[in-house]
Image (cartoon, rainbow, N blue to C red):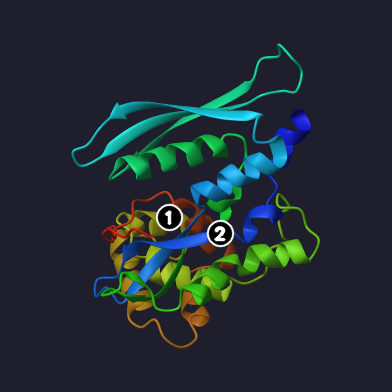
Amino acid sequence: MEREIASLALVEPLIDKVQIKAQALSSDQSRAMAVAYLEARDVAQRLDDVCGPQSWSDTYQLLQAGPSEWVVECRLSVHPPVEGARPVTKCDVGLGEDAKAAYSDAFKRAAVKFGLGRFLYTLPKVWGDYDSAKRRFSEPAAVRAQMLAAFSGRLQGGASPGTVAKESPHLSEKQLHWLSEDLLRRPGVEALFVEHFEKIESLSKAKRALGYLLSETTGDLRPRFERVGTTEEWRKYIDAAKQLPIALPVAATGV
């Protein structure tokens, strides 16, 4: 059974099943930040393929039923082929605006405890043009492709999902765009500037640097970022800024 459980964490069988949805909108609602997810039926199919339909089971406990939020706990068990052996069980809690969403979220979160779909947390959150009237990305395929590009490139190069790629001497275009659209706009970034950049010695200098970096987000962004700090300083800042709360409002989308 150990082999089957280890197989659940493989990325290749699920990479084509990755979907995207909008998590946050820009102030004018013309752009949205995309996050990756899997459909519950694809998670169930993967369990069937690896363990067999009769060798896993799921049970649920309703913790809260509305009115604005449902909360459900899922206990997901993988049963060994040996008679009398105890199953391996993982559990987690899911949230949703209705029962279906909460049960699905709980199931997928419990599956992540087995490694199934855990790679989703390593995919970058990218921004794309958004049609607020239709509540969808204008070009969802392009946004999804951008999100998967770096990860797919590693797989095509023969690296395992856990392999860390050799760092580039510069920030990538994707990192620069992510900084401009998200990580420089989160509350508390001024203090991080003082902490991580040698040239930024005070909060007033941090505010001036932010104003300079955000004054215009078109053209070649690299020179202005390099003027503020080194690539290593920016990488450390990215790791720290990802822990800050997102300032933009959460989009109420149901993709």
Q: In the picture, which quadrant includes the C terminus?
A: bottom left
Q: Quadrant of residue 53?
A: top right
| Disc number for residue 251 | none
- Taking depth in this image into account, of 95 and 243 the one nearest to the observer is 95
Q: Position of residue 181 (x, y in %)?
A: 39, 70
Residue found at the very far bottom of the displayed protein: 219
- Taking depth in this image into account, of 56 and 188 the one nearest to the observer is 56
Q: Amino acid at mark 1?
A: Ala
42 versus 144 height, above or below: above
| Disc number for residue 241 | 1
Instruction: Return the residue at label 2.
Output: 18
Q: Residue at x 71, y 14 (%)?
A: 85
Which element is circle 2 on? Answer: loop
**How many numbered circles does the render carry?**
2
197 versus 68 height, above or below: below
Q: Residue at x 40, y 59 (%)?
A: 193
Q: Residue at x 47, y 62 (%)?
A: 20
Q: Position of residue 112 (x, y in %)?
A: 56, 39
Residue found at the very far right of the displayed protein: 158
Q: Residue at x 42, y 49 (%)?
A: 243
Residue 119 in the figure: left or right of residue 164: left
Q: Quadrant of residue 52?
A: top right
Residue 129 seen in the figure: yes
Which element is circle 1 on? Answer: helix
Q: Amino acid at mark 2?
A: Val
- Taking depth in this image into account, of 110 and 230 the one nearest to the observer is 110
Cα gap from disc 2 to disc 1, whole angstroms:
26 Å
